[in-house]
Amino acid sequence: MVSGSDFTLTCNTTIIDSSQCTPDTCCLAQGQLAYLPTLAGNALFAAIFAILIIPHILFGIRYKTWSFVSWMSFGLVGEVVGYIGRVMLHNNIFDFNAFLIYLIPLTIAPAFITASIYLCLARVIYILDPGLVHTRLKPMTYTKIFVTFDFISLVLQGAGGGVAATADNDKAMNDMGVNIMIAGLAFQVISLVIFSCLCCDFAWRLYKGIVSSGMSFKVSDTDTSDAELGGVSSTDYASIKASKMFKGFIVALAVATILIITRSSYRLAELQEGFNGKLANDEVLFMILEGPMIILTCIGLTVFHPALAMRGLWSMKSFQKGGGADVGDKLMMTSATNSAVHSRGGSEEDVSGEQRAPHVNAQGYNVLNVPAKRR
């Protein structure tokens, strides 16, 4: 195992190309980083990210969350590759290829994970506000806007990382690459802040609407609506949003957004100083504000996976068939319907007198089958 004490104390100024360096001929300061990356810490982070890939692939296959699992998997694989690059740097701090393997994947990987968060917002809006009364934009409009923003950020970070990493001793090229990366990270942070503000705005408008109408998110096991729409009933929506898993999922999304903003802000400050700056060569800060921020994000989105939180619903076609203004109206009638049913001693009949029977929806969850409303 290589340690800092293995390097010569005197820097060899006769060697210009760092690839010709060895611990016996060059000092640590001539390496790609001013410190020797920890083997145990980086190997641990790589292993955690590798393990997290497995449940996401399994959930993706089971619940067909193809878009979510694709973005998350790209991000997780990028994290694994990046930390493998840091392990390689531990073994040879002068290896420029190892530096590239570390730098570029760890720079752009969180952008993929951010995209998976953006994909969830439209589904959350449909569940919390089926009538789309309290949202300023159509649910998918949010997703399209922010995924586009994320793609722009991804391209800028990737391109900037490539230019800066291959600039070698060309200071002008190096500065240009760093500036492009800074632009990409800044764009990502700004996009996440705007996203957070719009989410808070929707939550506030939804809260005010609920308070003014005297409604509640809480439903009992026998709560039901008076109609089924396209395979997703308003009972499905009500029972989902009342579940602890869905509430945990909302918290996980909020925490993930804050963690990624924190991580990206740190990397933004780091890059503004350049690769030779103090932040870029502070391993303690890196091991606190880079890896753990993304690990906690991914653990939260694994434990409270959207497929579990939404009880197998993911396809936007399912939500759009079950959405619309009339669903909101029907949901507003739910509490009155439940009161009528409960006042009859918890009868298994609906207010029209017709029997309702349990059935299993397309996602494998038990819901109540309620006859369509007579017109």
Image: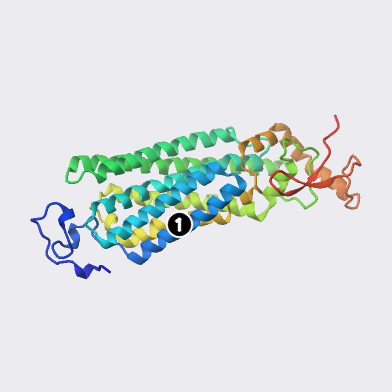
Residue 44, given in percent of the width and then of the height, sits at 41, 63
What residue is shown at x 65% (from left), y 44% (from top)?
Answer: 313
Which amino acid does the dot numbered 1 rest on? Ala
Q: Is residue 183 visible?
A: no
Q: Is residue 351 visible?
A: yes
Left or right, 205 with reference to 42: right
The kind of secondary structure element at disc 1 is helix
Left or right, 29 with reference to 77: left
Could you say which quadrant of the image residue 33 lies in? bottom left
The number of numbered badges drawn on the structure is 1
Residue 335, given in percent of the width and then of the height, sits at 79, 45
Vertical position of residue 319 compared to residue 53: above or below: above
Q: Residues within 10 Å of mark 1 (few under 14, many from 20)?
A: some
Left or right, 55 with reference to 272: right
Could you say which quadrant of the image residue 89 lies in? bottom left
Name the image colouring: rainbow
Residue 328, given in percent of the width and then of the height, sits at 71, 36
Could you say which quadrant of the image residue 65 lies in? top right
What residue is shown at x 68% (from left), y 38% (from top)?
Answer: 130
Disc 1: which residue: 50
Residue 60, given in percent of the width and then of the height, sits at 56, 47
- State which quarter of the image contains the C terminus: top right
Q: Nearer the viewer, residue 147 or 100?
A: 100
What residue is shown at x 45% (from left), y 57% (from top)?
Answer: 50
Q: Nearer the viewer, residue 314 or 285?
A: 314
